Image: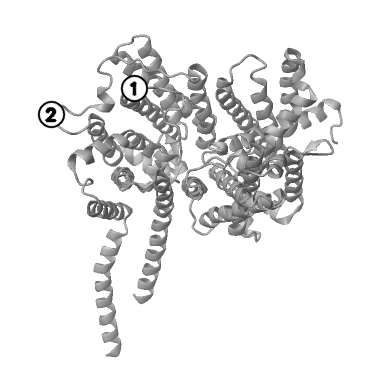
Amino acid sequence: MAEKRDLMTKSRLIDEMSVKNRLIEYFTQWEVLLSIIIVLVFIFFTTRTPYFLDWFNLMNATFQFSEKAIMALPMIFIIMCGDIDISIASIIALCAYVVGNAAQGGASIPSLIFLALLVGTLAGLFNGVMITALEMPAIAVTLATQSLFRGIAIGLLGDQARTDFPENFGFFGQQFIPGTIIPFEFVLYLVLVLLFAFILHKTTYGRRLYAIGNSAEAARFSGIKVKTMRVINFTVTGFFCGLTSILLASRILSVRSNIATGWDLEIITLVVLGGVAITGGKGSVYGVFIGSMLVGYLKFGMGLLKFSGTLMTIVIGLLLIIAVLLPRLLDMYKANRKLRLQQLG
Amino acid sequence: MPDLSFSSFVKKALARREAALTLLLVVLLVPISIRSPQFLSAKNISTILNDMAILSIVAIGEFYVILANGIDLSVGSIIAFTGMATGMINEANPTVSPLLLLLAGMGIGMVMGLFNGVLVAYGKIPPIITTLGTVNIYRGLTFLLSGGTWVTAHEMSKTYIDFPRNTFLGVSNLLWIAILVIAVFYYFSRYTRTGREVYAIGGNPTAAKFVGVNENRVRVVVFLISGTLCGLAGALWTARYASAVNEMATGFEMQAVAACVLGGVNFAGGSGGIIGVVIGTLFLGVVTNALPVIYLSVFWQTFVQGLIILIALTLNTISDQRKTKKLLAQRRG
């Protein structure tokens, strides 16, 4: 009799736990946590300054982060496979140099775009081939090409700047969708978010990326062309470096050899903050989207409140560490719960 | 029956990374010195060595982190913070001896390295992420510390500024310190228990744990070494360049990693040596200094550095793959 009652309380206990459990399970997902954080950040800044929650300001702020956010998308694929690319800022600089130079020579806008995309794609392909053909770690190769690609731009450009651009070239990085207050760059970013989300979450290619990240060996044995896919990832990233160089050059209408310096680490920060595991195999486009918006609007809001850029640097560094530490602590907490429940059951 | 012929001796010597790199360095020096005889003058050589002294100190710290399968991207920021701190201490107390300032730099750097190490070892955050975070945090702290201002030459004491330049037995103090660091860590790597444990953890963490190596301790130690050496480098940097600027040593991590790669340190961990790292540093120094000699504008320096690292990497990888194949063939008998 006592035994039966004991069993009943136990089962009721487990039932209650499971509702609570499901809630905990839901709210400890990184994407959900990020969404809550961004809402809190918006509430905080709205109560602090009347200029924050203003459509025009919110849209204008996207100019400051759209380019980096775009670069974070192809970077998801690279990091998903356990690779890394720290040469992207240098590829952007190289492409921007080519664009600036061709523009000075009088090239038309379509040919500028073509050139940027071509140079970027080739640079990315070079990275990918070096990494897979020689089986070298991505960080070592892209460390070298970081100097190599930017070195070309510095060598050819020296301390000069290129500032002659065709009329209307400023559209890509400065203008709004006609009749609205939405910047062209931001719309392009949103379209790309949908595209990358579709590829990663709805296609075979996307599922294979997860497989490679979890175990490249197992993926290879199950017939996935691991090396080819890794080369494609780097090439696609190079292509988007070309695209970004157009947006950037168009926005600031001046190309110097130090353009986009330090972007590598900032973009990797966006991806990792968005919940993509640096070891690969885990993460989502949605997370990176929210992460990018969080960093962008955090910077914007802190700027409005006249916080120094320094403080933002520290906050973003801390966010990155917390972003990795917190899920780990949550996992440990979950594992402990499971263990306790098992002992109960 | 061991092969004692001269050719096999040469082959064996060349198979050693350090020897091959030295040979390459000599081969490189021949055309440069023909083109410009004063390149090998005592004065120019001492310039190159002094230019490379700080990098060699930092590269040794980076070497231990890479050896244990990690990477330390925060070295530039630690140099900046400690350099700024020692500069400001010197500004406030001009009478403090330079040696004390070096110790202060090392102490501060040690704490920063410890923070990295604890996050990596106990927080289980991959080194690249940890230091990607701290590179921002430490650089930001540098700005907070200085309030955005600089410490300039006339705000610093003469004894501090002169310290790296002063000579002892004809060699500058800066170079003596680098030599001392190299000697200490050569000994540490080869003859101490902890030094060997770093190799063990980098080579095969699982096996190392089974034979009783405390993995977490080793991971903290390597970041501690890196941080402390960066602190030393920061204090020397401020004195040598007679100013402490917030942006100092930005991107220095890449040069430190490059010196390690050139020196044959494997990113997979567990292989490489101090001598290789020192030669790798020298190699970078000679190439950088030689550019004007071959009438190449300094603007091409970055490109040449990247090219050299890429070639070194490729050679490293090919020789490693050959070794593995040879071992496999031997095993098959």
User: Is B82 on the left or on the right of A85, as rendered?
Assistant: right
Q: Are marks 2 and 1 on the same chain?
A: yes
Regarding mark 2 in the picture, which secondary structure is present there?
A: loop
Residue at 50 percent of width and 19 percent of height: A158
Image quadrant for the C terminus of chain B?
top right
Q: Name which quarter of the figure residue B117 lies in.
A: bottom right
> Can you say whether A230 is above or below B230 in the image?
above
User: Which of the chains bears the disc numbered 1?
Assistant: A
Three-letter amino acid code at the position of disc 1: Leu
Q: CA distance from mark 2 to mark 1?
A: 23 Å
Residue at 77 percent of width and 26 percent of height: B43
Q: Residue furthest top?
A: A106
Three-letter amino acid code at the position of disc 2: Gly
User: Is B78 on the left or on the right of B263, as rendered?
Assistant: left
Mark 2, residue position:
A179
Q: Decide which of B82, B62 is in the foreground and name it.
A: B82
Q: Residue B317 in the image: x percent, y percent?
A: 61, 32
Number of other residues with Cα within 10 Å of mark 1, as a class: few under 14, some 14 to 19, many 20 or more? some
> Can you say whether B276 is above or below B6 in the image?
below
Q: Decide which of A117, B162 is in the foreground and name it.
A: B162
User: Is A38 on the left or on the right of B75, as rendered?
Assistant: left
Mark 1, residue position:
A253
